[in-house]
């Protein structure tokens, strides 16, 4: 069930789903890494470094990317209207999530408060991980947006191809 109008084949759609799953797994692993990193901080004079993205669990939102990739693969292998609409909904959610996560990460990277010298290395490493995650958010945004547009185009084409009940009634009465 590739996109007919945009020339995306079934194989390309499967690859997009697999890439979404890999990005999601990467984000979940980075969240776990940040969890271990920030849990090991010592209480210093300037306090602990607890960034905004860590408090909100931004990297853990990668679970939605995994779900979106699985829905894409399922809707490609079994293109029923229900699976396509579910896939479209989750991909739209991923577009929104990736924008919010990118904004929160940019806010985190722009504001850096002093931390204890004991926690400076952990804070610096955590900021490097946030920069790495910031690179992957536009990629997820692009994949989810492209696939959402393709699904909308496919649903519109499918709707135009199937005659509605009203038009069938008009044709039979004429």
Image (cartoon, rainbow, N blue to C red):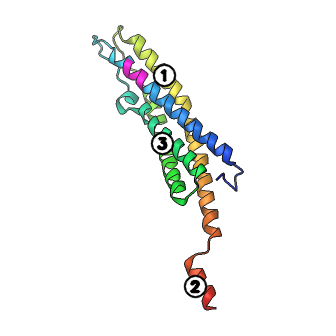
Residue 163 sits in which quadrant? bottom right
Sequence-first disc among 3 and 2:
3
**55 is higher (above) or lower (below) than 10:** above
Using the image, tell me which numbered label, if any, was put on residue 67: 3
The residue at 60%/86% (across/down) is: 170
Disc 1 and disc 2 in contact, CB within 8 angstroms: no
Q: The residue tagged with tag 3: helix, strand or loop?
A: helix
- Residue nearest the viewer, comparing 93 with 124: 93
Instruction: Sort mark 1 into few (<14), some (14-19) or many (20+) by Cα contacts within 10 Å.
Output: some
Point 36% across, 16% down: residue: 114
The magenta stretch is 32-36
Magenta stretch prevailing secondary structure? helix
Earlier-in-chain disc, 3 versus 1? 3
- 47 in relation to 105, above or below: above
Q: Residue 151: where, in percent of width, then height?
A: 59, 54
Crowd rating for badge 3 (residues with CA inside 10 Å; few <14, some 14–19, many 20+): some
Q: Residue furthest top?
A: 118
Is residue 150 rendered magenta in the image? Answer: no
For mark 1, what is the residue? 129
Q: Nearer the viewer, mark 1 or mark 2?
A: 2
In which quadrant will I find the C terminus?
Answer: bottom right
* Label pair 3/1, CB-CB below 8 angstroms: no
Judge by depth and name the residue closer to the eye, 83 or 127: 83
Q: Which residue is mark 2?
A: 169
Distance between mark 3 and mark 2 Cα atoms? 41 Å
x and y, in percent, of residue 105 in the image: 46, 30
Q: Is residue 44 left or right of residue 66?
A: left
């Amino acid at each position: 069930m590739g996109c007919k109008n945009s020339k995306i084949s079934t194989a390309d759609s499967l690859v997009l789903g697999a890439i979404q799953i890999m990005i999601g797994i990467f984000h979940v692993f980075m969240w776990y890494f940040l969890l271990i990193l920030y849990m090991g901080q010592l209480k210093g004079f300037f306090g602990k470094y607890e960034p905004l993205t860590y408090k909100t669990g931004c990297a853990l939102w990668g679970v939605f990317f995994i779900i979106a990739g699985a829905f894409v693969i399922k809707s490609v292998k079994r293109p029923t209207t229900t699976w396509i609409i579910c896939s479209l909904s989750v991909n739209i959610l991923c577009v929104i999530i990736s924008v919010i996560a990118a904004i929160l990460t940019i806010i985190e990277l722009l504001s850096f408060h002093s931390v204890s010298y004991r926690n400076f290395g952990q804070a610096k490493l955590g900021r490097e991980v946030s920069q790495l995650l910031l690179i992957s958010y536009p990629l997820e945004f692009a994949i989810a947006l492209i696939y959402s547009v393709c699904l909308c185009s496919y649903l519109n084409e499918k709707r135009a191809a199937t005659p509605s009940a009203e038009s069938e009634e008009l044709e039979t009465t004429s």
